[in-house]
Structures are given as C-alpha cells and as structure tokens.
C-alpha cells in the first residue's frame, strides 16, 4: 500500500484526468487553455492532474471526473482480444494504480471488473516468462508491462537468477578490489643538482 | 537480509537458506578419536574411529574438509530412491513427493565437499536436477490457476529453496489480486441497481493440490 513517501504513488497522481467544471471558478484561468478571462466557466472541459482533480472533487463537487482514455471501450476491446499484446505502459504506466483510485470517483461501475480481468489475463503471460528468462535477454512483451506488472516480473526473474548463481557455486567469499591493486609509492625527489 | 530492496517484502538469499540448511543432521563415520563437543544446539560425540555418529551438516563439512571423517550419504539420496521419487513426481500432476525440507541445499553441500563419499554421484546429481525441474513446473502450473482474491496457498511438501524461489513472485501476485478483487472494486459493478449484499472479508481458500 502506498505510503506518504511512495514515489510511485506521487508519480501516479501526476496523470492527467479530464474533468468538467460544475461551477465557475474565478482566478484560475491558468487551468483552462481556452479561457478568455482569468476564470474557468461552468461546463468547461479541462485536463487536470489527478491530485488536483481529486482535491476539487472532494471540495463540494466542484468538478466531475470523466473516465480516462486508458479505461475506455477501445482499450477494453483490445484487452479482450489479446491481453498480453496490449501496450499498457504507453497508455498509462500506472494503469492499475490509477484504476483503483478512479473507481470511486467516476460513474462507470465496470472499471473494477475490467482491471481484474486485465491483470488476470496478463498475469499468466508474466508467469510463463518470468522465472525462465535471464538477465541478458528480455522477452518482447516486457516493454509493454505497467509498473506493477514489471515489478512482479522482475522480482521473479531476480529470484531465479539468484538461485542459479548460488547453484553454480564458486567461492563464498569475495576479495575486496582494493587488495588487488599494486601500490605505487614515489620516493621523494633528491635534492636538485646545483 | 542481503539484497533487500523492498522494505515490505522479505527476501532470503539462497546463501542464507543454505546457512539454515546446515543445521540438518547427517551421519558421519569419523576416522579419529575425539571427545564430545558441547554446543548450544546440543552435544555431539564422543567420536570413535569407524563408528557412525550423527552431527549437524556444518560440522560434518568442517570435519570432512580436515580429512577427519567420511559423510554417509542420506537414505533418500541414492539412485534407486531418487528414481522412485522422480517417477512418482511425474505421475502425480499436483502433488509433491515428500523429500527433506532442505534437499536441494543438502545435495549441493555434499556434492561440493563430499563428492567422493557419494556413489554414482553424476547420476544422483542428474536425478535431483530432474526432480527439481518437474516440481518447479508443477508450482508454475498451480500458480496459473489463481484468478482472484486468494488468502492462502497451500503447498504441501514443497522444500525451502523451492519456496524461496517463488516467494517474491507469489507475494506480489497475491497482493495484486487482493487489491483488484476487493469488494470495494467489484461490489459497485455487481450491485448496480440492487440492494447491497454483505460481502465476507475472506475469499475462498485455494489448494494447489488435491486433498
């Protein structure tokens, strides 16, 4: 669970979210590129970072949040066709984290089911590749994984790599690199000839 | 624990699991006379030449390195026994045959330090590798069946090193399923337009083997 200092959680909240203002907002025209005055009109559609949209929503329902593009029907159809081949990272690196936070805020009730279906489908592909791939070669689907999926994949790969390294044996103790270096000591120069 | 980067996930390195395995008891045949050794974990000895004695693996390895004993191969680490285990492993798709909890580590230590005491060492090693591969494939096949919130996964007879390999993946996977299959995420969709039904906190317990 994300804590206060969780950098992934902080980065996730930077994702842009499309919102519609339910009230006019004075003095914040900076948020609306199409605003003519220093204010946002009621009904204006604006892209805000998640932390700001979430904050405004909790303050007297100032904005209503639209479903982000990565959870629309287009992405869902692609996931249903072949989940492992969809590049979720390019859509949203924090696909699952954002989805979990967006579910209570939007009217679409099926995002939760979609998240579970997506993870369940892609998880099998991660499972079949993670323990058997080495550090040298990277399977083709790895660049398409989200942050969370990549963590799962890398933890399994690192675990198997550590086991194989131990299995191969070798010396238990390692020599400190400094001990291998030869010391170069310069004798002080003699007095210069007159 | 070495190599720990995620504070929420405890990771044992294989060397640490091997260190724990060295407390297993093995049988040695000393070729020297020695008084009893009084350890915190117990008293071992006294040792007499050609009379078998049980000691921890770390002590057996230390004595072997000094040429003071031969290590008797465990009963399970013979060609006949391992062949039976391998056949049984292949026949049952979901069950694991009972083997010592640290069989991978014990076999590695014996191969590293007491190879001359093992008869048919090459065949024994090959059989253990095959057994480990078959068992790991069964673990992966079992993991594929996870498709929802799961509170516990029962893996009877799985050994320490096998658990250690799969622990990071399994823990993170179960955490993800726990999050995505939680009532807060799914209940909204399931109860659209109907009265909310009470949802028990615990999901179904899943066995990766037949009872």
Image: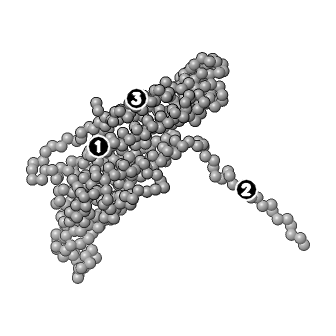
Q: Residue at x 60, y 17 (%)?
A: B51
Identify the residue under disc 3.
B98
Residue A149 placement: quadrant:
bottom left
Task: Tell me where residue B194 appears, x and y as whole percent.
Answer: 9, 50
Decide: is B112 above or below A65. above
Identify the residue under disc 2.
A183
Q: Chain of mark 1?
A: B
Q: Chain of mark 2?
A: A
Circle 3 SS class: loop
Among the two numbered marks 1 and 3 on one chain, the one whose residue lies closer to the N terminus:
3
Circle 2 SS class: loop
Decide: is A140 above or below B17. below
Task: Tell me where residue A50 appears, x and y as whole percent.
Answer: 28, 64
Identify the residue under disc 1.
B145
Crowdedness of circle 2 by 10 Å Cα count: few (<14), some, many (20+)?
few
Circle 1 SS class: loop
Establish whether labels 2 and 3 are both on one chain. Answer: no
Q: Residue furthest left?
A: B194
How much space separates mark 2 and mark 1, taking CA atoms?
Answer: 60 Å
Q: Residue at x 21, y 73 (%)?
A: A45
Task: Tell me where residue A139 appears, x and y as whole percent.
Answer: 41, 56
């Amino acid at each position: 669970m994300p804590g206060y200092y969780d950098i992934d959680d902080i980065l996730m909240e930077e994702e842009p979210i499309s919102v519609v203002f339910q009230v006019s907002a004075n003095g914040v025209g900076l948020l609306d590129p199409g605003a003519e005055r220093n204010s946002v009109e009621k009904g204006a559609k604006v892209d805000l970072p998640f932390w700001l949209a979430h904050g405004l929503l909790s303050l007297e329902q100032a904005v209503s949040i639209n479903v982000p593009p990565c959870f629309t029907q287009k992405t869902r159809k692609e996931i249903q066709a072949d989940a492992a081949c969809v590049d979720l990272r390019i859509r949203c690196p924090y696909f699952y984290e954002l989805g979990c936070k967006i579910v209570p805020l939007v009217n679409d009730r099926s995002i939760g089911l979609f998240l579970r279906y997506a993870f369940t489908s892609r998880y099998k592909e991660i499972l079949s590749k993670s323990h058997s791939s080495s550090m040298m070669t990277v399977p083709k689907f790895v660049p398409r994984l989200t942050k969370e999926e990549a963590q799962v994949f890398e933890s399994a790969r690192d675990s198997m790599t550590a086991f194989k390294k131990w299995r191969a044996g070798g010396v238990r103790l390692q020599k400190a690199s400094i001990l291998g270096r030869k010391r170069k000591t310069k004798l002080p120069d003699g007095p210069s000839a007159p | 624990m070495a190599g720990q980067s995620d504070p929420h996930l405890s990771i044992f390195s294989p060397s640490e699991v091997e260190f724990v395995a060295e407390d297993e008891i093995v049988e040695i045949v000393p070729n020297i006379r020695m008084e009893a050794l009084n350890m915190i974990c117990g008293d071992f000895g006294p040792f007499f030449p050609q009379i078998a004695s049980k000691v921890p693996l770390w002590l057996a390895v230390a004595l072997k390195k000094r040429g003071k004993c031969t290590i008797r191969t465990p009963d399970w680490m013979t060609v006949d026994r391992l062949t039976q285990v391998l056949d049984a492993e292949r026949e049952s798709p979901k069950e694991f045959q009972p083997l010592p909890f640290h069989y991978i580590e014990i076999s590695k230590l014996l191969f590293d330090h007491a190879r001359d005491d093992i008869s048919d060492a090459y065949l024994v090693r090959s059989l253990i590798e095959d057994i480990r591969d078959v068992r790991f494939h069964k673990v992966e096949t079992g993991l594929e069946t996870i498709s929802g919130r799961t509170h516990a996964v029962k893996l009877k007879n799985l050994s320490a090193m096998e658990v250690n390999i799969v622990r990071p993946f399994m823990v993170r996977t179960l955490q993800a399923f726990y999050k995505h299959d939680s009532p807060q995420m799914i209940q909204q969709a399931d109860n659209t337009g109907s009265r909310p039904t009470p949802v028990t906190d615990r999901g179904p317990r899943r066995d990766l083997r037949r009872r």
